[in-house]
Amino acid sequence: MTETVSFGYTDVAPAEKTARVGAVFSSVASRYDLMNDAMSAGMHRLWKDRFVRRVKPRAGEEILDMAGGTGDIAFRLARSGARVTVADINPQMLEVGIDRAVDRGIDGLVWSEANAETLQFQNRSFDAYTIAFGIRNVTDIQAALDEAHRVLRRGGRFFCLEFSTTLWPGFDKVYDAYSHRLVPKIGKALAGDEDSYRYLIESIRRFPDMPTFKGMIDKAGFVRTHVEPVLGGLVAIHSGWKI
């Protein structure tokens, strides 16, 4: 772990980032899914559907959905009959997910407060590990990837959905202008929180590009790692296997 890590465009001590990120998600938890719709024009739903199709969950297998507080990925995974554990470091996000599950009549999910860098689960506990739009908020990303590898069984698969950097000429400039100028204003209007959404956009810009992040997944011990760009890399699905 380095002496400082990025919190948006600011470099802070690791412990300070963990606390600040916690405050961000406590602030936005109740409006998190509404804001996802507003920021992505609803496309995040299509991205998540595509992501779960890549995971190919199967009845009876054990899946850990990390940073999955509001349940968006877990609800999709559970349709297959898989046994899903939803883990999140933020209790407010978990509360939102539990309430949503009750409203939808979804039973059987396990909800667990957990830090991705120091998971409490035993070695080789899960058949698959998923994390969607959460890895960039982790203080020590490499530690989280190492933990993902540890808790997977042999033959287990890792899938990560995360924002990245689009490679489409021209689109990157349009998206930069939209995200930096408009998203914080949308956050202020819908969630009453401009600063948290400014951080979320800045965190995307500071996240490693696709080849660099793929290298980090390799370093954690995964094999057959793969990157699937979406919208030219604006979003990417990363995957790997534990053997």
Image: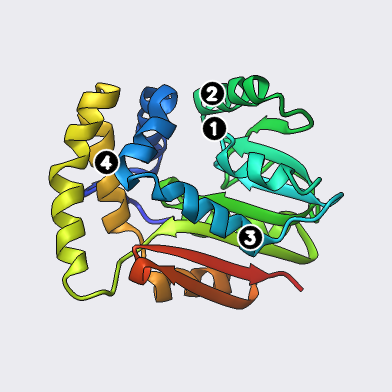
SS class, disc 3 = helix
Q: Amino acid at mark 4?
A: Tyr
SS class, disc 2 = helix
| Structural crowding at the residue carrying mark 1, measured as other residues with C-alpha within 10 Å and reported as few (<14), some (14–19) or many (≥20) | many
Which residue lies under the disc numbered 3? 53
Say whether residue 57 is left or right of residue 210: right
Which residue is found at the position 13% from the left and 54% from the top?
177
- The earlier-in-sequence mark between 2 and 3 is 3
- The earlier-in-sequence mark between 3 and 4 is 3
| Structural crowding at the residue carrying mark 3, measured as other residues with C-alpha within 10 Å and reported as few (<14), some (14–19) or many (≥20) | few
Which residue lies under the disc numbered 2? 96
Mark 1 touches mark 2? (CB < 8 Å): yes
Q: Amino acid at mark 1?
A: Thr
Q: Nearer the viewer, mark 3 or mark 4?
A: 3
- The earlier-in-sequence mark between 1 and 3 is 3
Which residue lies under the disc numbered 4? 199
Say whether residue 127 is left or right of residue 142: right
Measuring from the top left, give residue 49's x and y in whole percent.
56, 53
Which residue is found at the position 80% from the left and 55% from the top?
58
SS class, disc 1 = loop
Question: How much space separates mark 4 and mark 1, taking CA atoms?
Answer: 19 Å
Question: How much space separates mark 2 and mark 3, taking CA atoms?
Answer: 24 Å
Q: Amino acid at mark 3?
A: Arg
Q: Can you see residue 101?
A: yes
Residue 70 tag number? 1
Measuring from the top left, give residue 168's x and y in whole percent.
26, 74
Q: Nearer the viewer, mark 4 or mark 2?
A: 2
Which residue is found at the position 84% from the left and 51% from the top?
59
Where does the N terminus fall, quadrant-wise?
A: bottom left
* Scheme of image coloration: rainbow
Q: Nearer the viewer, mark 4 or mark 1?
A: 1
Q: Amino acid at mark 2?
A: Val
